[in-house]
Amino acid sequence: MLLFTAQIVAILSVLLLAVGYLKADPRAASARVFGLIALCVVLYLMSGMAGPNIAVHYQLDFGHWQPLIGVTSSSISGLFMLYCFLIFQESHRFPRSLAAAFLSQVFAELALMIVSSQTEGQGGSVFSGIALVLDLMQLGFVGLAIYWTLSGWSADLVEDRRVFRWFVIGVQGALIFFVLFLENFVFDGGTQAFLGVQAITVYAIAALALGMLLVSMKFDYVSLSQAIRKVTERESAPAESTNAPFDIDGFNKAFREGFLYREAGLTIAVLATKLGLPEYKLRAFIHQELGFRNFNAMLHVYRVAEACEILVDAKKANLPVLTIALSVGYQSITPFNNAFRELKGMTPSEFRKQALG
């Protein structure tokens, strides 16, 4: 009865979070992906209500729908990867190769479940090998999500989002990773240990979802979206004064005229030291006054701006693009090309050709 109650609490909490997020921000891609994750989590919880952990009179029978339920559960890792990308890699496009890998994993899972059910598990080592590859892909998706969440932490200028990164890694990512690992690689389905893991997972999801819901209510947020939007959108107005010893013009003079952005591998900690400022004040100033959400994004703007000045200079028409990239602070041509294309919509060579004719 306790496990059944926890499942009901978890399902209702997850649905309320998803509905609130979608209602407040229906056009946000992250909201839609969060809604899909919530749906998959709910179906995962419902699949557990069909197992022997639940009293017979509370059990659900999905019949022929069981393969579809299983596929939605195995889609959580890929959707979590996409969710983290949308929040923490906002200036990039989701790689097509990863999209193809995710879709391949989902359809392969569905095909494997259907074939296995029709052949009554007579697939032997072939089915086991395919299942192992698909399970490893799921772990890989979660690993990528955690990597993206961690990799941009130091350059993130949005303080709330920096904190949110640790919540994603420490709670959501860890839970998904360990459930996948234990259920797919450690315990065999149907064993008492496997059922124990499922029960613990239900309690963890119930506690996590209910906790997130209560936090949202405590801070008078209509839904979880209000909390997440604090870390996924730039505030429309500065929250408070940064008390910086210079204004925007003063910063531009020190940063641009001093060519500080040219330093290869420059970090916000190093820049704060050069400017004689506490790092947290510099973060707040760049985010609130200059409007940048990421330190590296600011570097790209200054570096590409100087590169453009060089590229349109007819006297420097024969100067190699690589030399220009190195002179403005990049350590190789690839990140320079990527940043330039992101800001100008074309490569440096195309920009030069268009400017000089």
Image: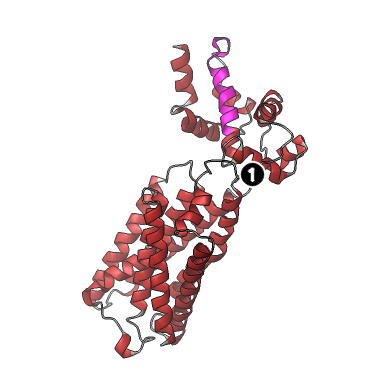
At horizontal 69% and vertical 23% (from top left) the residue drawn is 257
Choose between 146 and 131: the one closer to the eye: 146
Choose between 92 and 208: the one closer to the eye: 208
| Magenta stretch, main secondary structure class | helix
Provide residue 268's location: percent of width, then percent of height: 68, 41
At horizontal 40% and vertical 88% (from top left) the residue drawn is 1
Provide residue 176's location: percent of width, then percent of height: 47, 67
Q: Image quadrant of residue 138? A: bottom left
Q: Which residue is mark 1?
A: 240
In the displayed orientation, state which residue is furthest to the right: 276
Q: Is residue 77 above or below residue 337?
A: below
At horizontal 50% and vertical 68% (from top left) the residue drawn is 214
Residue 129 seen: no
Provide residue 337's location: percent of width, then percent of height: 51, 31
Q: Quadrant of the C terminus?
A: top left
In the displayed orientation, state which residue is furthest to the bottom: 56
Q: Is residue 309 magenta?
A: yes
Q: Secondary structure at mark 1?
A: loop
Q: Amino acid at mark 1?
A: Glu
Numbered range of the magenta stretch: 300-317
Residue 101 relative to residue 339: left or right: left
Q: Is residue 222 above or below residue 46?
A: above
Q: Is residue 315 magenta?
A: yes
